[in-house]
Image (spheres, rainbow, N blue to C red):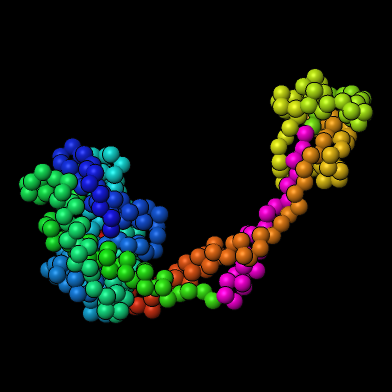
């Protein structure tokens, strides 16, 4: 989690940008219905035990992995942090009315949170430890944006934190999740053969479409169009004739249509362009718009970019897909359960 010294003003107090940015990323993932959140707040089995609240029907279990559980209160305070940060980042003052409007995202947030818990369990399995220096420096940056301890307490409250320990929990979880993603990314390096196979599979993606560049002069009369073609063949300037006779907007730019691919022009016009010889005038060609004199000045055939030119892009895409598959396997194999039906009725 990166912190900066800027401060977001609200109607009640100042919320440090680091809190706003964190919470906005958190809620943005919910809005987009992302299955997991990269480098965001998660609760490890060890750390979450510090914030597990009292039991009871009023605080039902919403997430369970083995013997580890998170309850309604665990999820709700995190969601409140996300909502407050999102609103502050949008310049919208927090109100219970605005919070209620976003409440409908809570079921999706619950699924996101389940994914976060799975990733934190993976961090524990890998024996990863949160970097205390990261925690300390983040807290220092947050405090540095404020005038005194009273401001710090107000900022935490406005951001949705009941105390500093909750903030520390999110910073710690963020660091652990980042480490998990970094570790997975380092382990899923594609081989040269995998890159080659992916390149062949995605060949169309790396193919530059055929393009034609042409000028035309559109007129209403076929005989005039034929005269224009003959005049250009005899050495007349196509651009000057377009300015003199053209009936569409291209007449002011020498009839230039620019460059285009197949399927972008009406069929009779495209067929004539494809059949034309570059550097020679052709026509008249009739379309529903009138009669055209056509001058194709460039033609670039379809070209497949060589693997050497796009290898880095192919490799990065394949690495991301392999990491996603790995994480998907973690999710499916975790046995994690969520219970959205236990959320309070709205």
163 and 208: which is toward the camera: 208
- Magenta stretch holds residue 211: yes
265 and 68: which is toward the camera: 265
56 and 191: which is toward the camera: 191
Is residue 262 shown left or right of residue 316?
right
Span of residues in magenta:
192-215
Where 342 sits versus 149, above or below? below
Quadrant of the snapshot with the N terminus: bottom left
Residue at 17% over, 46% down: 145
Residue at 38% over, 79% down: 333
Quarter holding residue 119:
bottom left
Is residue 49 shown left or right of residue 98?
left
- Magenta stretch holds residue 196: yes
Q: Position of residue 298 (x, y in %)?
A: 77, 43
Q: Position of residue 27 (x, y in %)?
A: 32, 53
308 and 323: which is toward the camera: 308
Residue at 32% over, 66% down: 178
Is residue 56 shown left or right of residue 226?
left
Is residue 342 shown left or right of residue 266?
left
Q: Position of residue 104 (x, y in %)?
A: 32, 52
Residue at 25% over, 53% down: 3
Q: From where the camera sits, is residue 222 visible?
A: no
Quarter holding residue 96:
top left
Where 295 sits versus 172, above or below? above
Please identify the residue farthest to the top as the structure is shown.
244
Q: Position of residue 25 (x, y in %)?
A: 33, 54
Q: From where the camera sits, is residue 139 visible?
A: yes
């Amino acid at each position: 989690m990166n912190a900066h010294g800027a401060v977001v003003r609200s109607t009640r107090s100042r919320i440090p940008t680091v809190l706003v940015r964190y919470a906005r990323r958190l809620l943005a993932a919910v809005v987009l219905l992302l299955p997991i959140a990269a480098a965001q707040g998660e609760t490890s089995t060890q750390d979450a035990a510090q914030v597990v609240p009292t039991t009871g029907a009023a605080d039902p279990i919403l997430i369970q992995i083995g013997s580890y559980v998170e309850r309604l209160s665990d999820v709700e305070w995190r969601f409140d942090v996300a909502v407050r940060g999102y609103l502050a980042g949008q310049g919208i003052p927090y109100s219970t009315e605005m919070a209620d409007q976003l409440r409908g995202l809570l079921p999706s947030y619950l699924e996101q949170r389940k994914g976060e818990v799975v990733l934190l369990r993976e961090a524990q399995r890998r024996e990863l430890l949160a970097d205390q220096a990261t925690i300390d420096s983040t807290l220092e940056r947050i405090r540095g944006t404020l005038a005194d301890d009273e401001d710090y307490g107000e900022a935490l409250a406005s951001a949705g934190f009941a105390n500093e320990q909750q903030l520390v929990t999110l910073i710690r979880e963020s660091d652990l999740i980042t480490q998990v993603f970094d570790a997975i990314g380092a382990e899923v390096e594609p081989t040269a053969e995998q890159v080659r196979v992916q390149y062949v599979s995605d060949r169309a993606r790396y193919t530059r479409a055929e393009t034609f560049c042409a000028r035309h002069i559109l007129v209403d009369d076929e005989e005039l169009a034929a005269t224009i073609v003959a005049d250009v063949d005899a050495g007349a300037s196509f651009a000057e004739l377009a300015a003199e006779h053209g009936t569409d907007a291209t007449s002011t730019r020498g009839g230039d249509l620019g460059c285009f691919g197949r399927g972008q022009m009406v069929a009779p016009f495209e067929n004539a362009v494809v059949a034309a010889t570059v550097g020679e005038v052709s026509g008249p060609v009739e379309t529903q718009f009138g009669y055209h004199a056509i001058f194709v000045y460039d033609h670039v055939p379809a070209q497949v970019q060589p693997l050497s030119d796009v290898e880095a892009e192919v490799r990065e895409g394949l690495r991301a897909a392999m990491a996603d598959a790995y994480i998907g396997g973690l999710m499916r194999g975790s046995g994690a359960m969520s219970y959205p039906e236990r959320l309070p009725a709205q």
